[in-house]
Amino acid sequence: MDFSDTQTETEFRQTARVWIQDNAPAYLQAPLSGSGFGSTRTGDFDPIAEAKKWQKTKAEAGWACIQWPKEYGGRGATPIESVIWGQEEGVYGKLSGTFIIGQGMCAPTQVGTEEQKQRHIPKIVSGEVAWCQGYSEPGAGSDLAALQTKAIIDGDNFVINGQKIWTSGAQHSDYGILITRTDSEVAKHRGLTMFFLDMKSEGVDIRPIKQANGDSGFNEVFFDNVRIPDVQRLGDVGDGWKVALTTLMNERLAIGGSIATGFPEIQALVSELIIASGPANDNQAVRSKLADWYAKSAGLKNTGARAISALSKGEVPGPENSIGKLVAGGMMQDIAKFAVDLQGLGGLVTDPAIARSQAQIQAMLMRSPAVRIEGGTDQILRNIIAERVLGLPEDMRADKGIAFSQIPSSQNTGAR
Amino acid sequence: MNFDFSSEDRMIQEQVRRFLSEQSPLSMHRSVMEGEALQATEVWRGLAELGLQGTAIPEAYGGVGAGYLPLCLVAQELGAVLAAVPFSSSIYLAAEAITCFGSTDQKERYLPKLASGEWIGTLALSEGPEAPTQTNLKVARSADTLSGKKLVVPHGLAADFAVVLVASAAGTDLVIAGLEGVERVAIEIVDPSIAAASLHFEQAQCEGLGNPGEGWAMLETLQHRAAVLYAFEQIGGAEQALNMAVAYAKERFAFGRPIGSFQALKHMMADMYVALKLAESNAYYAAWALQNDAPDLRLAAATARVSATQAFQLCARDNIQVHGGMGFTWAFDCHLFYRRSNYLALALGGLNEWENKLVDALPSAVA
Ligand SMILES: Cc1cc2nc3c(=O)[nH]c(=O)nc-3n(C[C@H](O)[C@H](O)[C@H](O)COP(=O)(O)OP(=O)(O)OC[C@H]3O[C@@H](n4cnc5c(N)ncnc54)[C@H](O)[C@@H]3O)c2cc1C
């Protein structure tokens, strides 16, 4: 066991650090540091343009998506080097938010043909194109395999009709991956097929949805006779579920290592806040919470480190990595509530010009409920741990072994 | 960077696991708990034959000198079977105190006997229902003798000597006192397998350990180091309690289905797993920090301690819940884990104390 850098790792870290010093957009350091959770602050500059610029700079020097093979524009770096890079990139890493879905989940590194990889991955690396993930539907979220968007083969194309929802970033995306139903007469997991498509295709209608926190990160996406060439099919017809699981595993890894918990924010707050009993830092209830949250965030970091080690040894990351988002989501929400509470009514102020730390805490308060839902709800993650890690029996299910067309569903599927 | 134990360390762990699964069944724990013996003597002897008491004790003093990493894994295995031996008191506390603060002469006299298991040591700290502080100690030293009563001394019935925290002219000292001739009375505690005693010193012989006046500071150092090893015992116990719960939930039927298919129980066990995983990862980091005397050892130790206490207490508690009425019987083993989880939680000072230690050790916030 060794938590310190080896000689090679030290050299790698040094090289990365020097390059970042020379090339990173230092003028964005201050606003980025003040970014609330779920938003990227770039001051007077356009966030998407700045994100693309930084991504391109990195890609040209071989510092983008460094864990990917060189032939696709990566650096062929080891998992541990990626961790080191993430540590060194620090606050500038926040600029990558726009690309996370494409880089973390969609890039057909695992499933595309060689020609598709050659064509698409380098542009994901360089930030020229953004991708989105079209999985959830009004009637299919946790129960993703209940999805109804239809794909019917027609010569060299598939014709798509239906609707996706909660599609993050669809309005800024060039491409999307799309899971569809190609057969309703077999069990629900078996009739699915995955594609990727050009989001500018005819018949695609994207409508942003206003979120509870006021932002509009996600969208409804309607498909009206959209034609997708068969060559853009990912995996075999009927194998869509398998492909989806691969991307979900990538998603867990992408999220798991570097997940935000809110700990630095609460620590900073209590170190300067005076409450009725005196400095918040000296209050026993505050200290007790702080210790608990630190222990949890350290636990996540160290668990991530173990996963990276396992990965370096060629082991496949398993369902045990589901704990990251489960712990972090609830913790962030607890922290935000506690932090607001400590400040009294003034803690509700959301104006960054007035609130402490540019209203980071308030942004967390309003964004954290989503962390417990997106990419698998807390309940679904607990189910996964119980069944796939602990081996407990499956839920009693009303849909097992029945053709999809025969499964009962809610009357009101467009539940909004 | 490599965040896992080496295959050599894992081999030692495997060997200990095999030995304990054959030689240290919970029935043996029960016989100690029910007062039939002061400890599982055969287990203690067997561990000594494997050289395990000496795992981290330097070779120069009769140990194996293999360091703390394998010792952590030994602790995890002892924790998993609730071994009824005074390993924690003798090795993580007494031997560690002498290794850290003893003179060469003291090391030569004590460590080989601790390494071979011939002697059992312990730490005498508590004097009553109040947690000890720098100012409330009544047991006092004058020159080479000490007097007063230590109330809850873990493994005090079996120990040959104790490292004792005492008030002295210089403030607080640590001393070593042989227990022959010292009056000891069995004390019932929540975990009777610990064979706790009260020790009544009356002008008992003692020798100083480390510098006079530095007793409290040494104690803090010792507790942080021991906390890492206790954390491994705790995660060993937590994992075993979780395994018991999962196994029972698969077998027991209610409403025509295994109770493990009820989501309320599945989610409860998922939460036990999460607590265990976090604790395990923090313990790994702390093991490394202990082995390497890392600058953040105190923070790492307190973090491991807080997580491990939380995890074992949660797993032991909810293991009873999963078992229903069976879980509340003397005959079922659930309460043994519940008892041990509460002992280990308090053995080095309770959760609240460690939360404070953790916060004290945090680097200040980056504003
Ligand atoms: C901010 C945000 C961004 C998102 N981005 C994307 C995206 O880019 N692409 C995309 O495809 N999707 C995206 N999603 C959708 C997300 O994956 C789904 O919202 C999520 O999977 C839950 O599905 P649902 O909303 O249909 O809720 P439901 O599945 O209807 O769940 C409602 C409640 O029922 C519970 N529940 C459901 N099934 C079970 C069960 N078996 N056991 C116990 N409880 C259960 C859930 O835990 C939840 O509490 C995003 C969501 C959010 C909030």
Image (cartoon, helix red, strand yellow):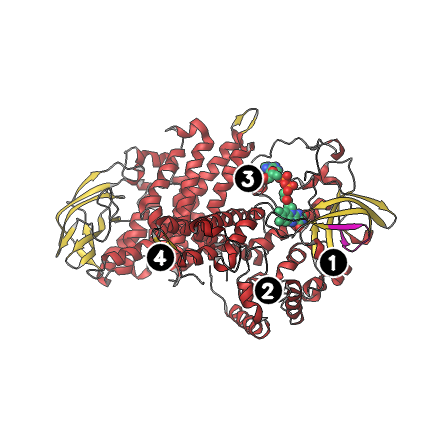
**Distance of label 4 from label 1 (alpha carbons):** 50 Å
Q: Chain of mark 2?
A: A
**Distance of label 4 from label 3 (alpha carbons):** 36 Å
**Distance of label 3 from label 2 (alpha carbons):** 42 Å
Q: Nearer the viewer, mark 3 or mark 2?
A: 2
Label 2: few (<14), some (14–19) or many (≥20) C-alpha neighbours in 10 Å? many
**Distance of label 1 from label 3 (alpha carbons):** 38 Å
Amino acid carrying label 1: it is: Asp
Q: Are marks 3 and 2 in contact (CB under 8 Å)?
A: no
Circle 2 is placed at which residue position? A42
Query: Magenta segment: does it hold A102?
Result: no
Amino acid carrying label 2: it is: Thr
Q: Nearer the viewer, mark 2 or mark 4?
A: 2
Co-location on one chain, circles 3 and 2: yes
Circle 3 is placed at which residue position? A386
**Distance of label 2 from label 4 (alpha carbons):** 35 Å
Circle 1 is placed at which residue position? A174
The foreground one among B202 and B59 is: B202
Q: Which residues are magenta?
A: A195-206
Q: Is mark 3 within 8 Å of ligand 1?
A: no
Q: Is residue A192 above or below residue B114?
A: above
**Mark positioned earlier in the residue sequence (2 or 1):** 2
Q: Quadrant of residue B111?
A: bottom left
Q: Are marks 2 and 4 in contact (CB under 8 Å)?
A: no
Left or right: A141, with B356 as reference point: right
Left or right: B157, with A229 as reference point: left
Q: Chain of mark 1?
A: A
Amino acid carrying label 4: it is: Asp
Secondary structure type for disc 4: helix
Circle 4 is placed at which residue position? B360
The foreground one among A366 and A155 is: A366
